[in-house]
Image (cartoon, rainbow, N blue to C red):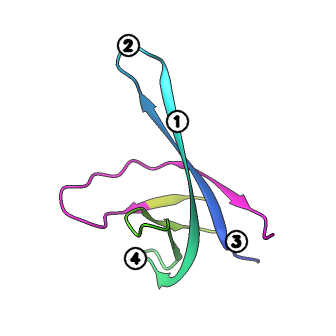
Amino acid sequence: MHTPDRYRLTFTHEGSGVGATTDKVVVERTDTVGPGGNPVYCDPTGILRAEISPAGEVRMLASGGYQSPVPPSAEPLRQS
């Protein structure tokens, strides 16, 4: 099975008094493997890190102290 090189992660946040807000971030596969044995993907800043399984299950990985990342939805991106 082909492992995608990039994913678009979509985070949904409840706004205060305004409906839900979404943020989208593109992450690229690294050479690192996460605790579940799946590839780790990272944004260009290195702050956002996620382990993504072949089934598209996302496990956010804290990159610093006091983080409590919320799992986003993941969409594989085609290579260009």
Residue 9 picture location, percent across and down: 56, 52
Pointers 2 and 4 in contact (C-beta within 8 Å): no
State yes or no: residue 47 in magenta: no
Q: Assess disc 4: are there few (<14), some (14-19) or many (≥20) residues with their C-alpha within 10 Å of its C-alpha.
A: few
Q: Secondary structure at mark 2?
A: loop
Q: Closer to the camera, 63 or 34? A: 63
Amino acid type, mark 3: Pro
Amino acid type, mark 4: Pro
Q: Quadrant of residue 60?
A: bottom left
Which residue position is annotated with label 1? 22
- Give whichever of discs 2 and 4 has the lower sequence position: 2
Nearest to the eye among marks 4 and 1: give it. 1
- Give whichever of discs 3 and 2 has the lower sequence position: 3
Pointers 4 and 3 in contact (C-beta within 8 Å): no
Which residue position is annotated with label 2? 17
Does 34 sit left or right of 53 as displayed? Answer: left
